[in-house]
Amino acid sequence: MSVAWIGSQPVPLTDAIRNAAKLLASCRCPVFTLDTDVHGTRSTIALATMLGGACDHAKGQVLANEVALFTNHGGMFTTPGEARRRSSLIILVGEIPPLHHDLLQAWAASQPDLGDKHSRRWFHIASDETSSSHGKLLRQLKAKPLRGEGLSLEATLALLRARLQGRPALSSLSNIDSFEKALATAQFPVFVFSGSSVETAGLVMLQGLIADLNRKGRTSSVFLPADDDAWGSALASLWMTGFPLRTGFINSLPSYDPVQWDVQRMIDAKEADLHVWVSGRSGQIPPKGEKIALISLSRTEVPTAGAAVTIAVGQAGVDHDGVAYSSRIGTFRAVQAVTPSHLPSVSKVIGQLAGALPGRREFAC
Amino acid sequence: MKALTFSLLALPDERLDLSCLTPAALAGLTDVQIAKLRIGTSRNPALVGDVFRITGKDVNNIVFEGGSSRFDKVGAGLSAGSVRVMGDVGNQAGRRLSGGTLYVDGSAGTHAGSGMINGRLEIKGNAGDYLGGPLAGEITGMEGGLLIVRGKAADYAGDRLRRGTIAIFKGCGDYAGYRMIAGTIVITGRTGAMAGYLMKRGSLLLDRPPENLSPTFMPCGEPDIAFSRLFDRFLMDEKIMDKPLLGPKPGRYGGDTAVSGKGEVLFRQQHR
């Protein structure tokens, strides 16, 4: 089975690498969209550094929203394990992505064994609209809603913060008395949120609320990323360059700017002239209709439509071993291949690409 | 002496960092030296001479003939003199401007006037998100000066404004005055949702009653205060407006009570 194509023609991997390296060497402004494991992320960033390109994640907008909380404000965070063992009061903020529902259900099935050891109570800070999948989770958790009529999530958070400080506000929230009572007895309330469910402004308000509560007792939050791999890539970028993703390399020096280095914006504005799409995830393809040259490193059995060069790559944890971020433990973990295959890893292909570039340059990975 | 003029030869392929083209940075440089300054941000960065034709001698008076949304950091760090752009500019125009005047004849991108300390920035067209706001990792936004937008501003105008005045003439997007610490924002036209969200102190002055405020803003009646007349006079003296904005007894909301509640939204009553 073929793993490399030039246009739609199957070719040996070495030919595809040579062709892709030629494109990389001759372009003016290469941009990289990635969605891969830690090793793949590190290789891609190292290649972008060599070539003076820009890096972004395939879910760049949601990731930028999550990162903005950390770059623009900060907050108080705890690990999921600490929350499970110590917290008898969990407050969900907005809609939590389905990939974390198992984790929350596991918490619901257990009881805290440290701290106040009461059975766990659940509340949910919500706007007026809730999706059906999230509604089902809330029913399973028996979460009481904290919501105001016609209010957005951001307004609800503001209202809750004002109310908990005894300040006036124009509206009220459902179940607020019951929540205040629960808050008074709980030793370690924990707010659980995701970057995809609340705007950054709402997240800042939430962290302010948590800071207020910490004047009288202990309160924290658990951040569950909208996508574990995306958050892992942001952390890998952080330790390599000092900045999260949406980082560009002018003169090989990193610069973080979530507006300037938004890769999709750069492609749409024709600021970039070569797009390198790096995704080990099945079924992920680059957005259609791009009018610049494309090199596609995808988990695919067919050439990517519109790509000058396509190279099939494996997925960490499926085709080969790897390291990935796990929000369940709040850090990185090793993942073993479930069905090892002949597909090369992203880092191996990127390493070959770097080696095929003309001139001797350092590939820092 | 004729103004130092940069005439655009052709639209650039890449984004340009024009922070090096200010009076202080160009003082003492010859035309040849200026033409060799690097302004491109791609692998093969453009030089000033590749993009502009340079004429004139007066470095305290700089003119860009032609603009582009790829002109980033125009007038960044300007401390004296004047810079005028006959067209659009990109992101971070007038960043950390501490004196002098920057005039943009077209529209500006995001973070115009970011971290301004003093001086005057005037944009004839529209402005992007985070007008006067801080960049990632910074504590405060605009810290002084006067920022005027004759068109519309997008979301988060005046984010973390600490001192100075921002005036927007054709309305703005959501979260105007977001996280304001102090200072004044004047808005005529429609204001988007959640104006003043997380506002600690400072004043948002509107020409009409606000819509979609956070419920943590409390109505405070129509106080008869000297401030509104005083500020109306300031706006007209500075030629920012040609008629009073608030009138004698403006309506008032206090907030954001989720934070300290010491900010205010003053607005012109519709019946006056």
Image (tube, coloured by chain):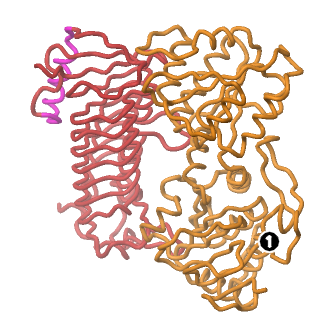
Which quadrant, please, contains the N terminus of chain B? bottom left
Q: Position of residue B243 (x, y in %)?
A: 10, 30
What secondary structure do most residues of the magenta stretch adopt?
Answer: helix
Q: What residue is at 14 percent from the left and 24 percent from the top?
A: B233
Please report, as a chain letter, where disc 1 is located. A
**Residue beneath label 1, please?**
A345
Residue B107 picture location, percent across and down = 28, 54
Q: Which amino acid type is shown beneath numbered disc 1?
A: Ser
Determine whether, in the image, residue A326 is placed left or right of residue A64.
right
Q: Which quarter of the rendering shows the C terminus of chain B?
A: top left
Q: Nearer the viewer, residue A338 or B30?
A: A338
Task: Say if the magenta span includes residue A304.
Answer: no
Is residue B229 located in the magenta-colored stretch of the structure? Answer: yes
Image side of residue B116 versus residue A202, left or right: left
Chain A rendered in what hue? orange
Question: Which quarter of the picture shows residue A56?
Answer: bottom right
Q: Residue at x 64, y 38 (%)?
A: A96
- Start and end of the magenta stretch? B224-241
Q: Position of residue A84 (x, y in %)?
A: 82, 28
Chain corresponding to red in the figure: B
